[in-house]
Image (cartoon, grey):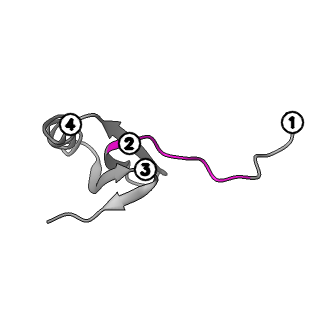
Amino acid sequence: MGRPATRPTRLRNGFYIEIKSPGGSAMLLRRDTREQMILAAEDYARTKMVTIKGEMKDDKWIAES
C-alpha cells in the first residue's frame, strides 16, 4: 500500500469530458483538441451519461463562450 498523496493531482492541458455509467462513479477523459473531445462525447453518449467540462490550461478551467 503506502502513504496517500498529500497534494491534489494536477490535470494536464487539454479538453475534458466526464463519463458516468448509471449507478457507477465518474471518470474524466482528456483530448487534445475540441473536435476530438466532441467526437468522444458523441461516441460515449450512446451508452453513458456525458458532461463536457471544458478546457484546462495551466491548472485553470478556461470559460466556455
**What residue is at 20 percent from the left and 63 percent from the top?**
64
The Cα atoms of the two marked residues, 2 and 1, are separated by: 29 Å
Identify which residue, 3 or 51, lies in the foreground: 3
Say which of marks 2 and 1 sits in front. Answer: 2
The disc, 3 or 1, on the residue closer to the chain's N-terminal end is 1
Q: Measured from the top left, where is residue 29 in percent x and y?
A: 37, 40
The Cα atoms of the two marked residues, 3 and 4, are separated by: 16 Å
Q: Which residue is mark 1?
A: 2
The disc, 1 or 4, on the residue closer to the chain's N-terminal end is 1
**Secondary element at tag 1:** loop
The disc, 2 or 4, on the residue closer to the chain's N-terminal end is 2
Q: Which residue is mark 2?
A: 13
Say which of marks 1 and 4 sits in front. Answer: 4
The disc, 2 or 3, on the residue closer to the chain's N-terminal end is 2
Side of 45 relative to 14 (left or right):
left
Q: Which residue is mark 4?
A: 33
**Residues packed near mark 3 inside 10 Å, few (<14), some (14 to 19) or many (20 plus):** few
**Secondary element at tag 2:** loop
Q: Amino acid at mark 1?
A: Gly
**Secondary element at tag 3:** loop
Q: Quick check: marks 2 and 3 in contact, CB under 8 Å?
A: yes
**Residues packed near mark 1 inside 10 Å, few (<14), some (14 to 19) or many (20 plus):** few
**Secondary element at tag 4:** loop
Q: Relative to 2, is 15 above or below?
A: below
Q: Which residues are magenta?
A: 7-14
Identify which residue, 47 or 27, lies in the foreground: 27
